[in-house]
Amino acid sequence: MRTVVIGASNSLVKGGVVQGMIDGGLNVVANGSLGHSQATILPFRLSDSQYGSLDFDHLIVEIATNEQIALRSSLANFTTIKSVLDWTARWCAERGIGLTLVTMPESASYLHAGDMRRFGVRRFLNEYAKERRLQIFDGYDWLDDRITQQGADLEGSFDTPAHIQTEIAHAFGVRIAESIDPTPPRSKRQLRAAPDFEYVAMAESESWARADTIERSTSIGSAQLLRLRAEQEFELELKRGNVVGTVHNAAGSTAILQVDGVASHAKRMDGHPGEKLILTAWGLRTPVPVDGATRLRALPVGYLPDLEHNHATIWRPLSRHARGLPTVELAGLVLANRPG
């Protein structure tokens, strides 16, 4: 069974859950995971320019960890998560591709179990899978059983707050591979009602040739990026819809991105300066309605009314120590299209 995995950093750990899937017998033909990513990675990776035209039989989605971290910071948007999952399930159903959801645990959901909000994304995904009759492998249940059966130490089961030990993740991956259901989802009425999602690459815009652009690459991939420096603007035409997410270089971004469409909204894009390329897909807690001419602006660090932070750096002050002008390196936008 030719399998594609789309997830976040847990699915990138060497020797971890994806290697376990492979060792358990799955033929993983592509791993489209990106660290720090949220649900909006799915319209990006399933676009024709990415894996949308790839021949495969099954899709495994692992998005829970960063959405859970975002939820604790009041940055998660369950409407967007559900709509993206419905769109993904419909996309799979139309192509006869099986779909499996995976939740990977993060330690704060255990250490602060009294706050039920900390289990919100896990609970949401399990209820969603039950309602849509999708298969889900719950890493929290897996870890609970391991602790109970083997007397493992909870805190010692994590390599970092967001990553369980590689050995445990590998065993979980083997379990997934051994038990996966290849049946494609059914295209029910709820799925057909989901909005269409589209990835809009900046490099395909008519304004690209006149813009400041850069291509960055690592050993695992490359990206063409629009480079917006402080107070610079970029104009493009977008279909009637809502901008619900970004795909950008978290390493090369040290500024705030403002999207001006029918309405305006600003989000911190700074992530992990110092690396060459950390491509990631983030959601917007507040979607931005657009209809035609849309303007993107990079704003210098500072505090704005209604500024949206991000789950990666919310506890970090807006930094003024980055070298050079504050910059946003943007690969594209994720758009939820509205009818009419």
Image (spheres, rainbow, N blue to C red):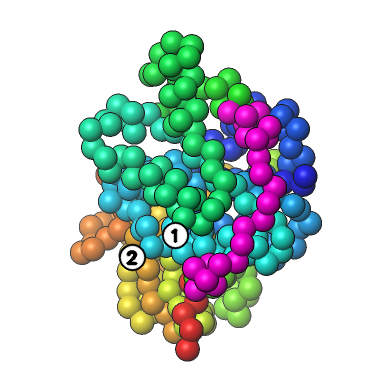
Residue 71 or 231: which is nearer the viewer?
71
Q: Which residue is mark 2?
A: 286
Residue at position x 48%, y 50% in the image:
130
- The spot of residue 133 in percent (x, y) is 54, 53
Q: Is residue 65 visible?
A: yes
In front of the other: 114 or 42: 114
Mark 2: few/some/many CA within 10 Å (<14, 14-19, 20+): many
Q: Nearer the viewer, residue 51 or 94?
A: 94
**Residue 92 occupies quadrant:** bottom right
User: Label 1, on which residue?
Assistant: 82
Which residue is pictured at 32% across the width and 53% down the height? 75
* Among numbered discs 2 and 1, the one appearing first in the sequence: 1
x%, y% of residue 96? 72, 60
Furthest residue toward bottom: 340
Above or below, 181 against 94 in this view is: above
Label 2 SS? strand
Tag nearer the camera, 2 or 1: 1
Image coordinates of residue 136 in percent, x first then y, are: 54, 43
Residues in magenta, as a range: 172-193
